[in-house]
Image (cartoon, rainbow, N blue to C red):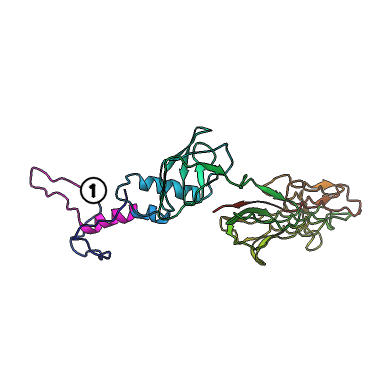
């Protein structure tokens, strides 16, 4: 039950906090036989408890109901589902319900065919709480006036699933009619490794590795008719940076994962690793790419391995030519010449970026 006090002595707006009798925060007491006073329960403390509880159904879009003692728990469940923490999938139907449905009521439902306990969320979707959630639509219209139906059938929606899709090249996926948002995880292309050519440690004999592409993760609202465009960054060739991956909604870029920098010789006998790609616009995560390993630093020579992305498998440094990366967004390996033959050897290529995405009904 969540309901603000409606006694005739209640006031219409939240009173200010008192300035008198302020002590050290502690715990309630019932007093003592030696004269210790019991703790007063004051109006501001009761208002605090009331408003903390009321915040849950208010955030879930539920009307306060003094006869429902499970409202805060139901609101917390609904808010958890709205975060997308539980993936949606289909199950067999139909399901039936008993009670009054409206856009601000949450009821327990039973999926009679599958024996699953379900939860009605907002008047648009019923989700299965017994396992991964499932989306259903009612055969009757739901309104704020409420519908009293002892056995109204629910049929499986046209939403077959919201499984992840993969984009390995630039594309413009069409949002389904029911979609309210898109969730995406995206990586920029990996940078290529450095080439090498030299006959001594005073020359360029050990190249550095390429940097990994940046990574973004976010959920973005979409409206009917808006276009969604995904640009997938290419992997950089020898001594070339990776390309930027991005998502645009309605023609506006909302997030981008930069390509990894290339390994290269910045000056004679000096080859620092390629920098990691940038990450901007992710409202759940922005993770810059890792840096490639350094190759040669004047009289010192090391192996310039490429930086791994979240997919791993970067290119390693290679004698006679760097190795290409295999993991999406990872950097290519630098080339080195162990015998210092003054032969030109090329760095390994970085791997292209990629995107995982799915459309969501909320």
Instruction: Find the magenta span and give its range.
Output: 26-53
Task: Name the secondary structure under disc 1.
Answer: loop
Residue at left offset 81%, top offset 58%? 239
Whether residue 218 can be seen here: no
Report the side of 172 relative to 57 (left or right): right
Q: Name the spot of residue 272 as percent of width and height, x first.
A: 74, 57
In the image as oriented, which residue stretches furthest toward the left? 34
- The part of the image, by quadrant, that contains residue 156 is top right
Q: Which residue is mark 1?
A: 27
Report the side of 120 relative to 340 (left or right): left
Q: Main secondary structure of the magenta part?
A: loop
Q: Nearer the viewer, residue 211 or 57?
A: 57
- Give the mark count: 1
Q: Residues within 10 Å of mark 1 (few under 14, many from 20)?
A: few
Residue 35 in magenta stretch: yes
Residue 258 in magenta stretch: no
- Above or below, 163 against 188 in this view is above
- Above or below, 156 against 184 in this view is above
Q: Name the spot of residue 335 as percent of width and height, x first.
A: 83, 51
Q: Name the spot of residue 289 as percent of width and height, x first.
A: 67, 55
Q: Nearer the viewer, residue 103 or 290?
A: 103
Q: Quadrant of the C terminus?
A: bottom right
Q: Nearer the viewer, residue 288 or 67?
A: 67
Residue at left offset 33%, top offset 46%? 68
Report the side of 171 relative to 80 (left or right): right
Q: Name the spot of residue 182 as percent of width and height, x first.
A: 61, 55
Report the side of 143 relative to 357 (left or right): left
């Amino acid at each position: 039950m969540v309901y603000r006090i409606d006694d005739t002595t209640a006031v219409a707006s939240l009173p200010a906090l008192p300035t008198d009798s302020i002590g050290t925060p502690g715990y309630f007491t019932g007093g003592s036989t030696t004269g210790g006073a019991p703790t007063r329960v004051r109006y501001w403390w009761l208002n605090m408890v009331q408003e903390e509880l009321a915040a849950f159904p208010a955030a879930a879009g539920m009307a306060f109901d003094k006869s429902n003692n499970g409202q805060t728990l139901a609101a917390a469940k609904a808010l958890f589902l709205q975060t997308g923490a539980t993936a949606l999938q289909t199950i067999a139907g139909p399901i039936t319900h008993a009670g009054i449905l409206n856009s601000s009521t949450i009821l327990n439902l039973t999926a009679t065919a599958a024996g699953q306990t379900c939860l009605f969320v907002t008047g648009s979707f019923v989700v299965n709480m017994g396992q991964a959630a499932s989306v259903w639509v009612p055969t009757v219209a739901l309104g704020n006036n409420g519908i009293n139906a002892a056995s109204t059938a629910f049929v499986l929606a046209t939403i077959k699933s919201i499984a992840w899709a993969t984009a390995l090249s630039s594309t413009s996926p069409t949002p389904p009619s029911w979609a309210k948002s898109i969730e995406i995880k995206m990586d920029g292309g990996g940078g290529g490794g450095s080439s090498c050519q030299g006959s001594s440690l005073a020359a360029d004999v050990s190249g550095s590795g390429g940097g990994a592409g940046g990574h973004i993760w976010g959920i973005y609202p979409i409206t009917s008719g808006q276009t969604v465009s995904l640009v997938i960054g290419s992997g950089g060739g020898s001594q070339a940076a990776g390309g930027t991956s991005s998502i645009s909604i309605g023609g506006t870029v909302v997030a981008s994962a930069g390509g990894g920098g290339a390994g290269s010789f910045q000056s004679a006998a000096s080859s620092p690793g390629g920098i990691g790609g940038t990450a901007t616009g992710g409202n759940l995560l922005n993770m810059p790419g890792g840096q490639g390993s350094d190759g040669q630093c004047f009289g010192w020579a090391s192996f310039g391995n490429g930086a791994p992305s979240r997919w791993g498998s970067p290119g390693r440094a290679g004698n006679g030519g760097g190795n290409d990366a295999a993991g999406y967004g990872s950097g290519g390996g630098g080339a080195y010449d162990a015998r210092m033959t003054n032969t030109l050897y090329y760095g390994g290529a970085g791997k292209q970026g990629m995107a995982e995405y799915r459309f969501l009904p909320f």
